[in-house]
Amino acid sequence: LLGTHENHYHHIMGLDYERALGFAAAGGVILGLSTTFYLAMIGRVTGISGTFKKAWLQSTFQASPDPLHLIFFGGLLCGGAIMRFTEAGWFEQGGYNTGLMVVSGLLVGFGTTLGSGCTSGHGLCGLARL
């Protein structure tokens, strides 16, 4: 099943290949269901960059309050924090230049603004609507 690279691919994030494949498949199903549910309930596609922008504007009192964006973005942060503390082995151990990471994040933010959204909105939702 794993071919000649069995030793290299046998452990992904500390998991065996089959278990990691199961997690990936489950994650895909969860993403598909959640984006479909969000579109059906809210009437908008799920886009992380747009949600972040609206949550930021609301938290700095530049936009009228709408708890949906703050709850959505807060859920993303909480989900990541829960995974970090429950499955710490799945995360890299750092060692990156902080300044370079900040500049990289700002460039990604600029790119998502220039491109009218990020891959979560375009890839997960945009192609499905096509």
Image (cartoon, helix red, strand yellow):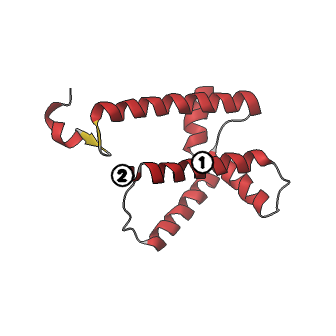
Q: Amino acid at mark 2?
A: Gly
- Can residue 59 be seen here? yes
Which residue is located at x 47 percent, y 66 percent? 101
Q: Amino acid at mark 1?
A: Leu
- Can residue 130 be seen here? no
Q: From the image, tell me which residue sits under label 1.
A: 76
The label shown at residue 6 is none
Which residue is located at x 61 percent, y 40 percent? 121
* Residue 71 or residue 28, whichever sits in front: 71
Q: Position of residue 111 (x, y in %)?
A: 57, 55
* Residue 102 or residue 78, whichever sits in front: 78
The quadrant in which residue 19 appears is top left
Earlier sequence position, callout 1 versus callout 2: 1
Q: Is residue 1 left or right of residue 110?
A: left
The quadrant in which residue 53 appears is bottom right
Above or below, comparing residue 66 to residue 59 in the picture: above
Which residue is located at x 16 percent, y 31 percent? 3
What distance separates the C-alpha of mark 1 from that of mark 2?
Answer: 19 Å
Disc 2: CA contacts within 10 A as few (<14), some (14-19) or many (>=20): few
Q: Residue furthest right?
A: 64
* Residue 89 or residue 5, whichever sits in front: 89
Above or below, comparing residue 32 to residue 101 in the picture: above
Q: Position of residue 94 (x, y in %)?
A: 38, 64
Q: Residue furthest front?
A: 86
Q: Is residue 109 left or right of residue 13?
A: right
Q: From the image, tell me which residue sits under label 2.
A: 89
Q: Is residue 3 left or right of residue 65?
A: left
Under tag 1, what secondary structure?
helix
